[in-house]
Amino acid sequence: MNRVHLAKLFGGCGIVLVAVSLNTLLASQGGSALLKLPLIHDERAPMSLFALMIGSVLLILTSAAGCIYAGRSPGRWHERIPVVWLEGLDTKKVEGQLYQLAIVAIYLVLPVVCFLHFIDVVWHSKLCVLGSTAPPIMVSDSWFDGIPGAANQIRLVEDLLPNGACGKGIEVYPGWEFVLVGIAIALSFATTIGFLLRVVVPVQSS
């Protein structure tokens, strides 16, 4: 891929990432979904988990494209950030540099802030066994071990049904599923930091 391809990949993945992050953030706060984009699930805990899964992959792709672009772009910091939407932008001018900073804030910083909110939502949600009326347990206490002796699906829920039974949410697999999501989040953060370092630290020409 050349720098043009990388800039398009950065811009394309970035805008989808922002849409997913903002859409889920607004919906999880009781607001209307952004641009009427459909959510995979309408409960706070499941929608937050799905946003972390999808968003982590998108953030890795966005940051990786930006990191490669920055590594192939000599010059000052603003020239090492992919130019999106405004073809031919003169980043040497003040307004061009402000635009580049805004792109980094919107495409990378905003999703990371949203991720922290989604992590908090999932962490303070509950696990229960489908059809059971037993009290649910907190994800924070059982994210790895799950529910010992569960005879049915383990569900990630915000709360039980009105009749006190477990029937909402989505099926999850405590242990490996939460570990994989955690690894994906960590990789997305690490890739983002790597991109930002590439932007700040000048490329050493051979």
Image (cartoon, rainbow, N blue to C red):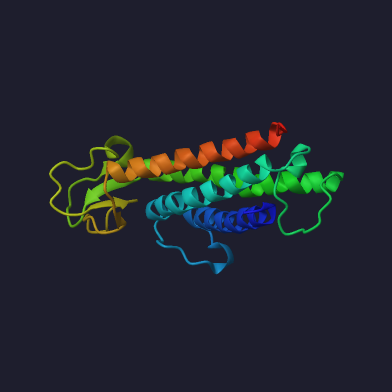
Residue lying at 35% horizontally and 45% vertically, measured from the top left: 125
Find residue 201 and report its horizontal and vertical position in percent. 69, 31
Question: Residue drawn at (68%, 43%), measured in percent from left and top?
Answer: 72
Residue 41 place in picture, x, y as percent: 40, 61
Give the percent coordinates (x, y) of residue 42. Answer: 41, 61
> Is 185 placed above or below 31 here?
above
Q: Among all residues in the image, which is located at the extreme front?
A: 206
Tell me if residue 15 can be seen: yes
Along the viewing direction, whichever of 204 and 182 lies nearer the viewer: 204
Q: Nearer the viewer, residue 166 or 39?
A: 39
Q: The N terminus appears in which quarter of the rendering?
A: bottom right
Q: In this view, does 92 lie to the left or right of 178?
A: right
**Image quadrant where residue 78 sits:** top right
**Residue 124 in view (yes/no):** no
The number of callouts visible is 0
Farthest residue, direction right: 93
Side of 129 where 190 appears, left or right: right
Tell me what residue is drawn at x 50 percent, y 44 percent. 115
Residue closest to the eye, 107 or 113:
107
* Left or right placement of residue 10 versus residue 127 in this view: right
Q: Residue at x 74, y 46 (%)?
A: 100
Tell me the quarter of the image containing the C terminus: top right
Q: Where is residue 151 in the image (x, y as percent from the top left)?
A: 12, 51
